């Protein structure tokens, strides 16, 4: 009886360094990829397509249809369907903001259940400062006898109040002249 032992399989590696063996494609139980180190019709057989890095995030080279994260093309060996699959990043936390002294969060106006104040957040026009309480309306200013003051309720004024310069029950109170208001 003539007994022959086949030569040991030739080793190969994919372009990303994953090691494999040269085999006939129909005898490979893993992933096949063409390799210049294999002879004839043999292909490089590996257990997987290996790992990759996309935008600084480590991932795996897998079929894009099975990826539950973010896929990036042209980083893996094999057919075009094999892409770099990375875990999707957790969503960024919304920025905080302050609207007239009330702390809020920069979110879409459609998600805000409080008061939206424009102009305080970066991004699209619908990203506004959302506060749970309505920010206080800044007091209007007024001028009485050449002195700049603030329109406030007469009961809050500790200085001189001047009727007729403010709307509602507020009166003008001086703030820049000593002794008018404290």
Image (cartoon, grey):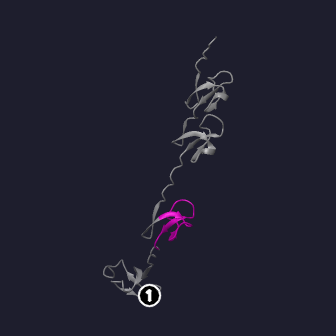
Which class describes the residues within 10 Å of circle 1: few (<14), some (14-19), or many (20+)?
few
Q: Is residue 129 left or right of residue 10?
A: left
Question: On the image, which quarter does residue 3 sit in?
Answer: top right
Q: Position of residue 29 (x, y in %)?
A: 61, 31
Q: Position of residue 41 (x, y in %)?
A: 69, 24
Question: On the image, which quarter does residue 148 sit in?
Answer: bottom left
Q: Is residue 79 above or below residue 13?
A: below
Question: On the image, which quarter does residue 143 sit in?
Answer: bottom left
Q: Look at mark 1 in the image and give the residue it sits on.
A: 169
Q: Residue furthest left?
A: 179
Q: Nearer the viewer, residue 94 or 82?
A: 82
Image quarter in which the C terminus is found = bottom left
Q: Residue furthest front?
A: 1
Q: Is residue 131 above or below residue 22?
A: below
Residue shown at 45%/88% (left/top)?
A: 164
Q: Is residue 52 left or right of residue 180?
A: right
Residue shown at 63%/34% (left/top)?
A: 78
Q: Which residues are magenta?
A: 105-133
């Amino acid at each position: 009886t003539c007994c022959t032992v086949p030569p040991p399989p030739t080793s190969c590696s994919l372009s990303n360094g994953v090691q494999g063996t040269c085999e006939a494609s129909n005898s490979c139980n893993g992933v096949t990829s063409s390799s210049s180190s294999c002879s004839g019709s043999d292909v490089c057989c590996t257990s997987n397509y290996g790992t990759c890095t996309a935008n600084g995030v480590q991932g795996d080279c897998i079929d894009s249809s099975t990826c539950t994260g973010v896929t990036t093309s042209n980083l893996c060996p094999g057919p075009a369907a094999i892409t770099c699959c990375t875990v999707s990043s957790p969503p960024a936390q919304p920025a905080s903001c302050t609207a007239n002294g009330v702390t809020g969060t920069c979110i879409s106006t459609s998600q805000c259940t409080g008061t939206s104040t424009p102009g305080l957040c970066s991004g699209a026009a619908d990203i506004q400062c959302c506060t749970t309480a309505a920010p206080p309306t800044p007091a209007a200013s007024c001028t009485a006898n050449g002195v700049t003051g603030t329109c406030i309720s007469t009961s809050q004024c500790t200085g001189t109040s001047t009727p007729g310069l403010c709307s509602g029950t507020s009166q003008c109170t001086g703030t820049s002249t000593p002794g008018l208001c404290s």
